[in-house]
Image (spheres, rainbow, N blue to C red):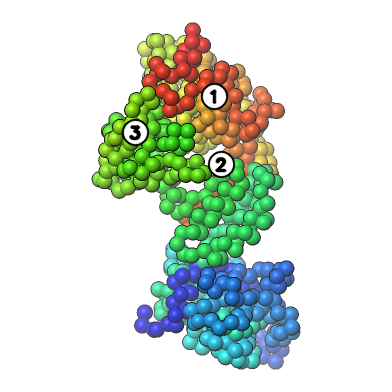
């Protein structure tokens, strides 16, 4: 990049999200009759929209340097215009440095029709006491972050000072042989003063009109601008997704329109350091349903990699529950061949500290145990307490984590089967359970089966359904959203008498989501007796929504109505056991100490 750019341009294109987050669907003034009487209709005339209560145009997104954000005002000026008395005005009254700016932005709709065309953006600009410059900007983005295909921002010909209405054009070639993600455009004021824009429109022009593309000299400066537009787009999409699909039209008591305005203001002023993702997670947490959540791109990628057959990420290899009652992390299960398993860590063990730092809990009752994580080959010293024993220190070697969640099984007293189902997120769980059941019957048929769901936090319907098919049959209930209701039909299949075997299901406070549906359905239709403690009460179905930057939101969209208990509200009550046994997961370490398991065996007797 040989050309030297002003500090403003460098900041704008390196630290603003590339889409300027608010595109300028602009002006609705009639054409200059003298100059355009014989001109063809524009490819897209950008209308000015109605005003918001603060006087700003309601379809424009406002962006700027966070430190100077409040110094700029964007309004729909109904007294000054190029042809009539309406235009868009960006102004700043106080003296501001060159790297301060106020801007508006927007995306061009229906972009496929422009592929292979030479596209002209034009508009009229008027300035008053502009200390640096004002101008239109126009950019074509390809697929992939920072992939600018064409760009012009008028930096080399923008008006400054005080000028009457002038006509400006920006001309870019729209490629037709590569993927195009978006076409962005907007208007900005650098420094102080007033700048008006009017009669903005797009036209398809011939090759006799020269392009004004500055992309080759500006490529390295576009990443921040892309980030800003991308983030604003994600914010809008996320808010709208919840608004349109959330399971409850009262948003669980949250004032969703007010939340939109609160977080819109915060993300516009947020620094380019990941705060945006934190704000999106906080916005979803306002629903307070304990089920919907937001993941940044790294977290979403880790979610995809979880339970894969490849070495997806590094760590010690264990699933834990944050447990304020014991000021630690309680192990649910460890991954096979992981550092945790090789170090002898077991389910029920409590992790009190990592390298001397407490793993739990902050004022809200939780802490993310970042000290435990780290690259493969490094070590962490964990302070571990097995129930009934004194704390001890164990050094664990971190390594690549891969493989599936383990389904544990055993035969008790030679006649009762036991299968622990740790999670329904792993797509191999239903196959593992079926295989375990067949193996348990290898030496003869059993008299009963205990299914342990106490640490099962739920997962996917693709696992829930085939699991239910092993043990029941028919219409077991309905999934209901704001838009429709559909019947959950189970096509039962008998594997080694699985449809007739007496069942006992163990549940507890960590039994969550589809693990609750599994337990509640089999209890409601008389297939199983449920023993333990009341489950969490979180049976809404969430659906994933992926965004352009790789982030993801899981939004609660459906609730469940059991066929045999249509008046039940499991979201409020949880699954209530037939036989209550009060014992926490962290209060025992061996089967002999397991009161719920003992009660299940006695029930069969």
Name the residue rendered at 48%, 87% in the picture. Answer: 156
Q: In which quarter of the image is residue 358?
A: top left
Locate residue 158, reporting x and y percent: 53, 87
Residue 291 — which label?
Answer: 2
Name the residue rendered at 46%, 14% in the picture. Answer: 598
Q: Nearer the viewer, residue 602 or 544?
A: 602
Instruction: Tell me if I can see residue 515 in this picture.
Output: no
Secondary structure at numbered mark 2: loop
Instruction: Tell me if I can see residue 154 in this picture.
Output: yes
Secondary structure at numbered mark 3: strand
Q: How far apart are marks 1 and 2 (CA)?
A: 20 Å
CB of mark 1 within 8 Å of CB of mark 2?
Answer: no
Locate residue 328, reporting x and y percent: 42, 36
Pointer 3 or 2: first along the chain = 2
Pointer 1 or 2: first along the chain = 2
| Mark 1 neighbour class, 10 Å CA radius: few under 14, some 14 to 19, many 20 or more | many
Q: Up-down: is 283 above or below 65?
A: above
The reply, left or right, for residue 592 in relation to residue 267 is: left
CB of mark 3 within 8 Å of CB of mark 1?
Answer: no
Nearest to viewer (mark 1 / mark 2): 1
Nearest to viewer (mark 3 / mark 1): 3
List the residue tagged with mark 3: 384
List the residue tagged with mark 1: 533
Pointer 3 or 1: first along the chain = 3
Q: Distance between the residues labelled 3 and 2?
A: 29 Å
Q: How many labels does the image show?
A: 3
Q: Distance between the residues labelled 3 and 1?
A: 26 Å
Query: In the image as oriented, which residue stretches furthest toward the top?
Result: 605
Q: Nearer the viewer, residue 421 or 68?
A: 68
Nearest to viewer (mark 3 / mark 2): 3
Secondary structure at numbered mark 1: loop
């Amino acid at each position: 990049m040989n050309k030297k750019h002003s500090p403003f341009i460098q900041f704008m294109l390196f630290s603003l999200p590339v889409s300027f987050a608010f595109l300028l669907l602009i002006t609705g003034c009639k054409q200059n009759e003298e100059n355009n009487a014989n001109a063809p209709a524009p490819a897209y005339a950008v209308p000015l929209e109605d005003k918001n209560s603060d006087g700003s145009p309601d379809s424009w997104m406002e962006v700027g340097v966070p430190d100077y954000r409040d110094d700029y005002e964007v309004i729909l000026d109904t007294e000054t215009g190029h042809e009539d008395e309406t235009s868009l005005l960006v102004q700043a009254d106080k003296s501001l440095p060159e790297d301060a700016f106020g801007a508006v932005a927007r995306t061009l709709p229906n972009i496929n029709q422009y592929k292979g065309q030479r596209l002209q953006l034009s508009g009229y600009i008027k300035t008053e006491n502009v200390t640096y410059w004002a101008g239109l900007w126009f950019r074509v983005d390809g697929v992939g972050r920072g992939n600018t295909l064409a760009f012009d921002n008028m930096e080399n010909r923008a008006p400054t000072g005080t000028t009457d209405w002038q006509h400006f054009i920006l001309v870019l070639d729209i490629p037709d042989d590569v993927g195009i993600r978006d076409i962005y455009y907007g208007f900005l004021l650098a420094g102080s003063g007033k700048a008006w824009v009017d009669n903005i429109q797009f036209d398809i022009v011939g090759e006799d009109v020269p392009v004004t593309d500055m992309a080759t000299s500006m490529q390295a400066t576009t990443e921040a601008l892309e980030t800003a537009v991308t983030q604003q787009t994600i914010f809008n999409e996320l808010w709208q997704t919840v608004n349109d699909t959330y399971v409850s039209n009262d948003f669980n008591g949250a004032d969703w329109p007010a939340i939109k305005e609160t977080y819109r203001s915060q993300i516009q002023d947020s620094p380019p350091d990941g705060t945006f993702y934190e704000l999106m997670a906080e916005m979803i947490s306002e629903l307070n349903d304990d089920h919907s959540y937001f993941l940044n791109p790294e977290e979403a990628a880790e979610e995809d990699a979880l339970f894969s057959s490849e070495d997806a990420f590094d760590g010690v290899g264990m699933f834990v529950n944050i447990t304020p009652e014991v000021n630690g992390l309680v192990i649910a299960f460890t991954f096979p061949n992981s550092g945790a398993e090789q170090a002898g860590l077991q389910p029920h063990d409590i992790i009190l500290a990592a390298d001397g730092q407490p793993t739990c809990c902050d004022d809200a009752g939780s802490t993310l145990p970042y000290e435990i994580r780290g690259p493969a080959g490094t070590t962490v010293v964990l302070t571990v307490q097995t129930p009934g024993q004194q704390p001890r220190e164990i050094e664990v070697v971190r390594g690549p984590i891969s493989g599936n969640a383990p389904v544990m099984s055993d035969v008790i007293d030679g006649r009762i089967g036991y299968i622990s189902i740790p999670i329904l997120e792993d797509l191999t769980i239903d196959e593992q359970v079926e295989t375990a059941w067949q193996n348990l019957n290898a030496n003869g048929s059993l008299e009963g089966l205990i299914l342990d769901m106490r640490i099962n936090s739920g997962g996917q319907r693709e696992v829930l359904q085939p699991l239910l098919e092993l043990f029941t049959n028919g219409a077991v209930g309905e999934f209901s959203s704001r838009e429709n209701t559909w019947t959950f039909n189970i096509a039962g299949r008998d594997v080694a008498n699985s449809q007739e075997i007496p069942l006992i299901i163990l549940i507890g406070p960590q039994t969550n989501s589809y693990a609750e549906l599994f337990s509640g359905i089999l209890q409601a239709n008389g297939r199983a007796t449920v023993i333990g403690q009341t489950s969490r009460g979180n049976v809404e179905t969430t659906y994933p929504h992926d965004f352009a930057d790789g982030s993801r939101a899981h939004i609660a969209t459906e609730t469940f109505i059991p066929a045999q208990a249509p008046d039940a509200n499991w979201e409020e009550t949880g699954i209530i056991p037939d036989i209550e046994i009060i014992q926490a997961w962290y209060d025992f370490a061996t089967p002999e100490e397991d009161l719920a398991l003992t009660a299940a065996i006695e029930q069969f007797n």
